Structure formats: C-alpha cells, structure tokens
Image (cartoon, rainbow, N blue to C red):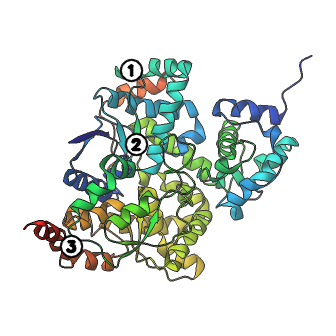
Amino acid sequence: MWTKPSFADEISNEMYATGTRGLNCCIQCATCSGACPAVEFMDHTPRRLIGMINAGLRDEVLASNTFWVCASCYACSGVCPKGIKPSELMYVLKRYSIWKNKYRDDLVGPEFSRRFVRTIMRTGKSYEPGYAPAFIFEGGVQGMLREMQFGMKLLAKGRMPLVPSRVKRVDNFRRMLSRIVPLEGIE
Amino acid sequence: MKRYAYFPGCSAETVSAAYHLSTVETGAKLGVQFEEIEDWNCCGATPYTNVDELLASTLCARNLAIAERTGLDVVAPCNACFKNLYHANRHLRSDADLAEHINFALEADDLHYAGTGNVHHLIHVFVRDVGLPAIKQKVTHPLKDLKVAAYYGCQLVRPDREDGFDPAGPRYFEDLVAALGAKPVAFAQRLRCCGASLMIGHRRAALGMVRELLRGAVQAGADVIATACPLCQLNLECYQKDVNREYGTTYEIPVLYFTQLMGLAMGISAKKLGLGTELVKPTKVLECAARKPAAAGAAAQPVKAGQP
C-alpha cells in the first residue's frame, strides 16, 4: 500500500545521491556537534537537527538557522562513526528550503545564494559588489554603509573590481546551462 | 619544466591578485609553468551547491573539459575551487549517467568531458611534485627568526580525498615553512574553518570563527599567518577590525599567501609578489626578507670546502 513520503523520507531521498549513509542510522552521539566550529551560533546542534528530522518535526527544522550557519568545512563528515555526512545534509536542507521557499526571513544566506547563482548564470564569473544588497537585510542601512566603506578600502588597494568580469563565450555558456535548467527569469 | 593547466579562480582577478602574481613568479623560479585554462568560468563556490547540485557540477565540468584539451593536470590555488573541481572530477568519473547528462550540456560550447585529467591544489604541486629539497635549493633569503602559523583551512584537507596526504595530521605546510628558513609555530586551529562565505551569509558566526583563529595564532606567538586560500586570507586579514570591534580585542597580525613567503625567501622583489596591497602591514616579514642573504654564502661554502 502506498503511503505519502514523510519529511524524513524526503530528506533521505535528497541525500541519496550524495553518497552518505542514511539519517536513520544516527546514534545521537553528538560527535558532529563537537567537531562543528560554528555550533555556538546555531539554534539547534547538528545532532539535535538529525534527531528532529527523524522525529518528523518539519516546521521546526525549516524554522531553524542551523543549516544556513553551516560553512561547509566538512569537520563533521570526517568524524561521524556511522558514516553519515552531516555537511551533505546541510546542503540538502539549504536546497530543500530554497525549493520550498520556506526559511527564516532574517537570514542572509538564501538571498545571497540566489544572487550568486544569478550572477554566475549571467556572466560565468563571480562579482563581489553585486552581493552587497544582500546585507541590507542583516545590518540595515548602517550595515550596508559599513560594507561600502570596506569595499572602498579594498578598492584603494586595487583589490576590488569596478566592472564585472565575464567569460568570453558567454552565449555558449548560457546555452550550456539552459540544457540543465530553464533560464527564464534569469536573463 | 613542469606544466599545469592553471585555474586562477574569480578572486585571482580581484581580491587575491597578489596570490596569482606570487604563484606565477615562484613557479617560474622553480621551473613550473602555470598555463591559464582558456576562458574558464567560476567553480560555483558553495552557494551553487546550496541551490542546485547538477548546475554546480556542470560549471566544474566545463573547466575540466577545456583543461583536458591541453592534456595537462589541473591546479587550483584556492581551497574551495580545488575542492569543487576535485570532487566534480571524481563524481563525473564514477557516474556515467551524470557524465552523459552534463556532456549533453557541454556540447553547447563544443566541449566534451572524458575524465582524463587530475586535479591538484597549488600547495600540493609545490610540496609533492616540486619537492622540498628543490625549494630549499632556491632559498637565498631564509626567513630566519620569522614565526609562521601555517594555516591549512578546511577544504584543503577535507572532505575525503585520495591524494596521499594525511587529512587529520598533515605536516607538509609546516615543513614548507621550515624549508624557507622560518619557524612554524604550534597552531592548534590550523585545520579549523575561517567561516568562508558566512562572512556574507551570517556575519556574526564568521567573525566568531575568525576570532578563534586569530586568538590561536597570536597565542602561539606567530608573527604572520600563512594561508593557501584567497577566502581564508580575506576573512583573516580584512575582517580583523570587525573582529576587534565585535569582541573588544586588539588583533593586528599580517596574513600572507604561502607563495609570497616562498617568493621572498627566494629573493623575488616584494612588488612582484603583490606585497603592498595588505590592510595589515607585514613589517616583520619584510624585515626578515630584507636581511643580508647570509645563507647564499653558507650554501656556497661546502662546495669550496670540498675542493682540495
């Protein structure tokens, strides 16, 4: 008999391609949390988040900042005694929350990621000043001004570009990406 | 002459131009030629994987496919670029369906990925392919008395690699520093993350992570932190003021690329190595490098002594 996939199933399915073992073999030992350099800034530790997913607490998981505070340093993945890669789980949750458009609105991460992807899709290369508007959400106008000041300092040292760089065959580049995802709304 | 297909990465054109310059200069001195991958694109960094994994692999595959045409192995100076390219390469090699899907996309740019090349990090090329004895031989201005915190960062050693380097207790960075005549300090946080793009995504967390690294380096008595990644360099150097503001600390420690230290020890001029663009002046480093090259004489002596 068919039953609707649970939240834990959805996340497990997303994780399938990343080569990690399933969350259902987690023994809640918290080695991941102990290895994490960013854990003190997370609402829930990685161990707890895995427990919450297994318990089906979808809304609470999506309302937490934990996976957007992950810097992808892979410290946890190297130490898990059960072969789970929590860093891949964090990527999965980031993608899931962007896909569902459901995340805490005080987070800069989702907007920054979207801006970054849009920039690369247009030009093929990264352009730092283009991400500055993402800050306005966190630091307000004051934060934005401080960021601009910072940019000017780097500019004075010749370390900040005024004009975005781009790949030469940008038409081919975009056609390539459009074979992977539709580019409507990007160009 | 060793040759590599060189992937500079977006930051090499802007915020880490000094890394790029010093890489090319020190490479030339050691007989390594870095040939820039023609019309390369961004590796996708981390935000790409945050949004779509398939797109992230496609970006890397394009660079790998262009590099394959030259028949050379790829080398990336940035930890994140290296990690992305290395893992995309491994993933594509082991998954024929994925490679077929992405090759369909690559056709749009007349490219084909076959998986014939390998991907290396710049520091691995220097310590493994060139080797410390060859580097030592070229040192004319040993950085005597300079205490260096060799900072690996996270994505240089993780996640699981098959490159022969010990991921839990690597020594090669410290050995490289010692080969330059400098003194590597015991830097406990050397494998900890610098916060990477959290500096944009979650400023408070990133500043906390940078503070921990600065604290460790200063406590270990380092005069300078040596990095092998543009993002580590940017976070550790350029955000020191913000850390000080947030935590009431007074850190002011220079952060240089390991290639700049190599270049200085080999007698390359500071300007050619992109020095002078720092926000924290590396005064002590420049002093050490400017000293009379005593070692050049010392190196010549045994030859004389050997003569009858």
- Per the model, the C-alpha gap separating discs 2 and 1 is 21 Å
Q: Tell me which corner region of the image, top left, top right, bottom left or bottom right, holds residue A84.
A: top right
In front of the other: B44 or A121: B44
Report the residue at 30% width, 49% height from top: B130
Whether residue A182 is visible:
no
| Residue on which the image places disc 3 | B295
* Whether residue A54 is situated above or below residue A45 in the rendered picture: above
- Mark 2, residues whose alpha carbon is within 10 Å: few (<14), some, or many (≥20)? some
Indicate the chain on which mark 3 is placed: B
Chain under callout 1? B
Secondary element under disc 3, as helix, strand or loop, is helix
> What residue type is disc 3 on?
Ala
Quadrant containing the C terminus of chain A is: top left
Mark 2 and mark 3: span between their CA atoms? Answer: 32 Å
Query: Residue A145: image x %, image y %?
Result: 48, 67
| Same chain letter for marks 2 and 1 | yes
Q: Residue at x 37, y 27 (%)?
A: B65
Amino acid tagged 2: His
**Residue on which the image places disc 1:** B112
Is residue B242 visible in this depiction of the protein? yes
Mark 1 is on which residue type?
A: His
Residue A108, by quadrant, is: bottom right
Q: Secondary structure at mark 2?
A: strand
| Residue at figure coordinates x 44%, y 30% from the top left | B61
Q: How many marks?
A: 3
